Image (cartoon, rainbow, N blue to C red):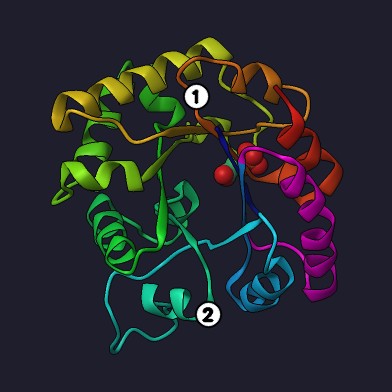
């Protein structure tokens, strides 16, 4: 079973969001995979009520590390669980790039999500310069090590990692399926070495209705995190049906 997750980012208004949720529900219902939509905070409750009783899971695009307190503008794991959200995206490269997210804060958010039984998808990935200068493995080691600090072996299967090479996000350039598979295999081996077990790992970065089947057919790829193509129900539906 794979996980196919759509990251809507900061797109669409209420009516379009409602339509997209309604339009992707039939694909989720017909699929044996787990289908998740990461919708903007303000539309979470609407999406949750529309998806109620269906197989579509709803997640938030971020979650704060503290239980509560003086953190103006932030949303806690407990609040998300309170309204019925099941998933949270953590450490997306846009959060790291534009909002000062660090490996340490990613770890805090992950611990907070697990504590509240919110299912985390933690994003990891190297930049183009890092790949070109042969630093990919070193960067992935570092990001994984910090993200998974204080995590116990038994918690690994409750975590999902998304390998998202930064150079492939929103650029139309996908990692080749071999590149993605090899890197994900490397990440899984790293986790097995550290914990004796690996979390599932998704691929993300310009995945679309055309390249999805090949990427998802790779041995080590457990699903996809899709940005741009998740905003169209027909494209996202084709990705859900790809394989
Ligand atoms: P993209 O985004 O599919 O538009 O490249 C992926 C992501 O940011 O999760």
Across and down, in percent, residue 46 comes to 70, 77
**Does 144 sit above or below residue 28?**
above
210 or 157, which lies in front? 157
**Residue at 76% across, 42% down:** 30
Q: Helix or strand or loop: what does disc 2 sit on? A: helix
Q: Quadrant of residue 108?
A: bottom left
Residue 225 x/y as whole percent? 57, 41
Residue at image coords 82%, 48%: 233
Say which quarter of the image contains residue 212: top right
Give the residue pinned by disc 2. 83
Ligand 1 near label 1 (Cβ, under 8 Å)?
no
Q: Which residue is drawn at 65% across and 37% down?
A: 32
- Quarter of the view holding residue 81: bottom left
Dot 1 corresponds to which residue? 221
Decide which of 118, 76 is in the foreground and name it.
118
Q: Where is residue 72 in the image (x, y as percent from the top left)?
A: 39, 86
Q: Does the magenta stretch include residue 174?
A: no
User: Is the N terminus in the top left, top right, bottom left or bottom right quadrant?
Assistant: top right
Query: What range of the chain is rendered magenta?
Result: 9-33
Q: Are marks 1 and 2 in contact (CB under 8 Å)?
A: no
């Amino acid at each position: 079973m794979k996980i196919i997750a759509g990251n809507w980012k900061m797109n669409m208004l209420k009516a379009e969001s409602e339509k997209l949720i309604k339009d992707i529900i039939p694909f989720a219902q017909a699929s044996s995979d787990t289908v998740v939509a990461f919708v903007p905070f303000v539309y979470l409750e609407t999406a949750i009520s529309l998806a109620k009783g269906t197989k579509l899971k709803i997640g938030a695009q971020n979650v704060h590390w503290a239980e509560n307190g003086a953190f103006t503008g932030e949303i806690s794991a407990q609040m998300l669980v309170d309204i019925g959200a099941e998933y949270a995206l953590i450490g997306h490269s846009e959060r790291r790039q534009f909002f000062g997210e660090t490996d340490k804060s990613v770890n805090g958010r992950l611990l907070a999500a697990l504590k509240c039984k919110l299912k985390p998808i933690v994003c990891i990935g190297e930049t183009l310069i890092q790949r070109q200068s042969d630093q990919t493995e070193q960067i992935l080691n570092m990001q994984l090590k910090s993200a998974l600090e204080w995590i116990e072996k038994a918690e690994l299967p409750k975590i999902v990692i998304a390998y998202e090479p930064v150079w492939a996000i929103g650029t139309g350039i996908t990692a080749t399926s071999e590149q993605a598979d090899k890197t994900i295999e490397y990440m899984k081996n790293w986790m097995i070495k550290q914990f004796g077990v690996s979390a599932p790992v998704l691929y993300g970065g310009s995945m679309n209705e055309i390249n999805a089947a090949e990427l998802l057919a790779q041995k080590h790829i457990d699903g996809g995190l899709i940005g741009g193509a998740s905003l169209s129900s027909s494209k996202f539906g084709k990705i859900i049906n790809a394989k």
